[in-house]
Amino acid sequence: MSSVFTSQDISGLASRPLLKWAGGKTQLLSEILPKIPPQYGRFIEPFFGGGAVFFAVRPENGIIADSNPELVNLYRSVAADVNGVIAQLRRYENTEDVFYAVRSLDRTKLSNIEAAARTIFLNRTCFNGLYRVNKSGQFNVPFGRYKNPKIINEDALGAASILLSKTTIICGDYKTVLKENAQAGDFIFLDPPYLPVSEYADFKRYTKEQFYEEDHIELAAEVKRLHELGCYVILTNSNHPLVHELYREFAVEVVPTKRYISCNGKGRTGEDVIVTVPPRPCFNLRLVPAPLSPQAMRYPSTRYMGSKNKLLTELWAVASQFNFDTAIDLFSGSGVVGLR
Ligand SMILES: C[S@@+](CC[C@H](N)C(=O)[O-])C[C@H]1O[C@@H](n2cnc3c(N)ncnc32)[C@H](O)[C@@H]1O
């Protein structure tokens, strides 16, 4: 395949994550995707990481964000100049010498395109595809010694470029991103660094900053705000008692998952939870309800005990705000409500 993409070459390609990412949601997609509402405003994913859900959903008007500037630079660069990133990647070889030479480069002194290619190269060739930085923000995962890693996946890069170029990409803390962007009707996928449940859990070292227990409590308060605001939210986390406590008013489902541990790379099964939060139902009682239909007006006034004849206008003021095809009147008595 040619290394220079035109938008025609790539318009039919399926997108998928560009990075191997600890805690990536590819293996949970079959659980998460059916829970996404069929219709919503914008798609917002503020703990983006490898973006498995975003690349599967392929939203037309997405907002993605992460607090890790290296990741954000990668996605912005692939959106702006995917051919430049590929050309730069072609200069790197999968050898120990090249790996450590590229790793030692200070990404803040590179061009955006060079820094993006460095991120992909290190991710594809380092040990277990881990992302870990030291206190000063320097990537410090060792060489992975893989025989033939796929460093350049032209199809994935091309498809990602199309998708990312119609997406708003923000570098920042999730709270600011949500406060400034979330609106009623939006769908928000939240995949924060997990609460650790075992000695192996090491999902927190994505940036120099950590995500502590207080942060999870604050995140739950933000989820409640989004619920009140009228957003759809899906959140994933580890199967930790605090997660059940924080989200007890919502649907919390435990699902099996495979965790990859850094010491031997073998799969270990564990459990994640998926929290599904619908928008808070919101009824704006109309001051002047919709008029009753002529059919209801023709119905003879009833003297049936408990008949809701006199309440028809008020009942219709509420019922007329639902979208429905069929109405069932279970304790119908005189049937005056059902007839309406
Ligand atoms: C579990 S990963 C997301 C994985 C992603 N869903 C996937 O499929 O690859 C969590 C991400 O949240 C980011 N992050 C951590 N703290 C954050 C914060 N306060 N605001 C925004 N992003 C944050 C990390 O940089 C990391 O990329």
Image (spheres, grey):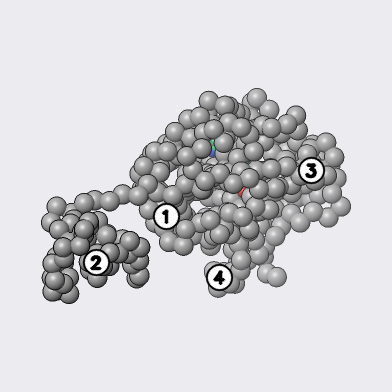
Could you say whether the residue bearing mark 4 is in a helix, strand or loop?
loop
Q: Please name the amino acid that badge 4 sits on.
A: Ser
C-alpha span from label 2 to label 1: 46 Å
Q: Are marks 4 and 2 in contact (CB under 8 Å)?
A: no
Q: Are marks 1 and 4 in contact (CB under 8 Å)?
A: no
Q: Residue 225 in the image: x percent, y percent? A: 39, 38
**In which of the image's four quarters is ligand 1 placed?**
top right
Task: Name the front one of labels 4 and 2.
Answer: 2
Q: Quadrant of residue 192?
A: top right
**Mark identifier at residue 334:** 2
Residue in view at x 79 percent, y 37 percent: 262
Could you say whether the residue bearing mark 2 is in a helix, strand or loop?
loop
Q: Residue 63 in the image: x percent, y percent? A: 46, 50
**Mark identifier at residue 42:** 1
Q: Which residue is mark 4?
A: 11
Task: Name the front one of labels 1 and 3.
Answer: 3
Task: Name the front one of labels 3 and 2.
Answer: 2
- For the C terminus, give its image quadrant: bottom left
Q: Residue 310 in the image: x percent, y percent? A: 15, 58
Q: Which residue is mark 3?
A: 268
Q: Residues within 10 Å of mark 2 (few under 14, many from 20)?
A: some
Could you say whether the residue bearing mark 3 is in a helix, strand or loop?
strand
**Mark identifier at residue 16:** none
Q: Which is nearer the N-term, disc 4 or disc 2?
A: 4
Q: Residue 123 in the image: x percent, y percent? A: 71, 45
Residue 299 versus residue 59 in the image, above or below:
below
Horizontal placement of 29 versus 338: left or right? right
Q: Which is nearer the N-term, disc 1 or disc 3?
A: 1
Residue in view at x 14 percent, y 71 percent: 300
Q: Which is nearer the N-term, disc 2 or disc 1?
A: 1
Residue in view at x 67 percent, y 36 percent: 203
174 vs 239, nearest the viewer: 239
